[in-house]
Image (cartoon, rainbow, N blue to C red):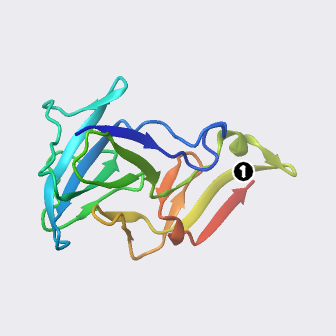
């Protein structure tokens, strides 16, 4: 079993000449199999891959093999990779933090010699204030801070890709550091000038 890994860029990322983003440094792979009756069972639970040069390897050099030749294999990849001790057997919700982007990919295949295409998409919105904006003046005023009201991402359901947010809106300062939030939770921006 082999993989072809790519990622889509965030809108506005890069020069616009390509639809792909940078390769993730690591990802966790999960594989479920589905029998003819549609019953799923977890087959591979958090196999961690790390980018080494232009290809991905595991710490022990072992790569997944097809469980059988007939079952549909459902692939889920999450980047950055979870700690190797994280498992989703019985509970597919995994805690995440808002200080990093979450990339997510799914694929489905029966046994084949062709590489499985894993194309990552962004699950969270990146909010940042570019350095040039922080130094810009607006009618003699200088930008002091940019804050937003939003909910942090708390968990990711690995199987479905659903993000669960905290129940309370948070005031998050994005003046100097980008943050990643579930886009649908953005409530308001506050821009302070001096």
Looking at the image, residue 144 sits to the left or right of residue 54; the answer is right
Q: Secondary structure at mark 1?
A: strand
Q: Nearer the viewer, residue 35 or 149?
A: 35
The residue sitting at 41% across, 56% down in the picture is 98
Residue 73 is situated, as x and y percent measured from the top left of the image, at 22, 56
Tell me if residue 127 can be seen.
Answer: yes
The residue sitting at 13% across, 62% down in the picture is 89
Residue 74 is situated, as x and y percent measured from the top left of the image, at 26, 58
* Image: 40 above or below 115: below
* Image: 168 above or below 71: below
The residue pinned by badge 1 equals 143
Residue 184 is situated, as x and y percent measured from the top left of the image, at 52, 70
Circle count: 1
Residue 51 is situated, as x and y percent measured from the top left of the image, at 32, 31
Looking at the image, residue 194 sits to the left or right of residue 86; the answer is right
Q: Residue furthest top?
A: 53
* Image: 174 above or below 60: below
Looking at the image, residue 140 sits to the left or right of residue 3; the answer is right
Q: Nearer the viewer, residue 39 or 153?
A: 39
Tell me if residue 100 can be seen.
Answer: no
* Image: 186 above or below 2: below
Q: Nearer the viewer, residue 172 or 60?
A: 60
Dot 1 crowding, Cα within 10 Å, few <14, some 14–19, many 20+: some
Task: Name the image quarter holding the N terminus.
Answer: top left
Q: Residue furthest right?
A: 139
């Amino acid at each position: 079993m082999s993989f072809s890994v790519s990622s889509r860029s965030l809108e506005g990322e890069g020069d616009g000449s390509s639809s792909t983003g940078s390769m993730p440094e690591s990802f966790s792979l999960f594989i479920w199999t589905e029998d003819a009756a549609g019953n799923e069972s977890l087959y591979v639970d958090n196999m961690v891959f790390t980018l080494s040069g232009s290809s991905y390897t595991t710490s022990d050099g072992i790569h997944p093999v097809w469980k059988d030749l007939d079952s549909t294999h459902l692939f889920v990849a999450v980047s950055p990779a979870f700690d190797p001790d994280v498992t989703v057997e019985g509970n597919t919700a995994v805690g995440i933090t808002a200080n990093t982007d979450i990339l997510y990919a799914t694929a489905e295949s029966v046994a084949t010699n062709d590489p499985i295409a894993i194309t990552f998409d962004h699950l969270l919105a990146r909010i940042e204030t570019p350095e040039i904006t922080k130094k810009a003046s607006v009618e003699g005023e200088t930008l002091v801070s940019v804050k937003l009201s939003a909910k942090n991402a708390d968990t990711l359901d690995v199987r479905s890709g659903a993000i669960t947010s905290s129940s309370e809106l948070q005031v998050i300062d994005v003046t100097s550091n980008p943050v990643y939030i579930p886009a649908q939770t953005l409530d308001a921006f506050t821009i302070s000038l001096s």
